[in-house]
Image: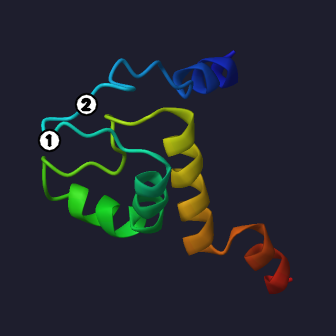
Amino acid sequence: MILVVVLAACVAGANPEVGAASAEGTVAGFWMGLWHGVIAPVTFFVSLFTDNVNVYEVHNSGNWYDFGFVLGAGILLGGGAGAGRRR
């Protein structure tokens, strides 16, 4: 039962800001997601000490931003090929 509660707590919720423009009037797409994925470790470190820096852009285009973000993070961390080489 505890495992079910823990896993349910990790379920992502809907982002009401998807497709909505930011204060600058822009929406982050695939290329911005790719960039944010690459710089995610640095951004995470900075976000620990600053309230106005977030790892993930909430004003995004949806699935394409998510794909770019995951791809960028995978590129930085070596992805599956990097894990296979270590064996």
Spot occupied by residue 24 in the image (x, y as percentages of width and height): 14, 41
Spot occupied by residue 41 in the image (x, y as percentages of width and height): 40, 66
Q: Label 1's element? A: loop
Identified at 42% across, 63% down, the residue is 35
Identified at 55% across, 41% down, the residue is 64
The image's colouring method is rainbow
Spot occupied by residue 87 in the image (x, y as percentages of width and height): 86, 83
- For the residue carrying disc 2, how many other residues have a C-alpha within 10 Å: few (<14), some (14-19), or many (20+)? some
- For the residue carrying disc 1, how many other residues have a C-alpha within 10 Å: few (<14), some (14-19), or many (20+)? few
Spot occupied by residue 10 in the image (x, y as percentages of width and height): 55, 28
- Label 2 near label 1: C-beta < 8 Å? yes
39 vs 9: above or below? below
Can you tell which mark lies on residue 56? Answer: none
Of 58 and 3, the residue lying toward us? 58
Q: Quadrant of the N terminus?
A: top right
How many numbered marks appear?
A: 2
What is the residue that sits farthest to the bottom in this orientation?
86
Q: Which residue is mark 2?
A: 21
Identified at 20% across, 52% down, the residue is 53
Q: Which residue is mark 1?
A: 24
- 67 sits left or right of 83 in the view: left
- 85 sits left or right of 11 in the view: right
What is the residue that sits farthest to the front in this orientation?
25
- 21 sits left or right of 71 in the view: left
Kind of residue indicated by mark 2: Ala
Q: Label 2's element? A: loop
- 73 sits left or right of 56 in the view: right
Q: CA distance from mark 1 to mark 2?
A: 7 Å
42 vs 1: above or below? below
82 vs 13: above or below? below
Kind of residue indicated by mark 1: Glu
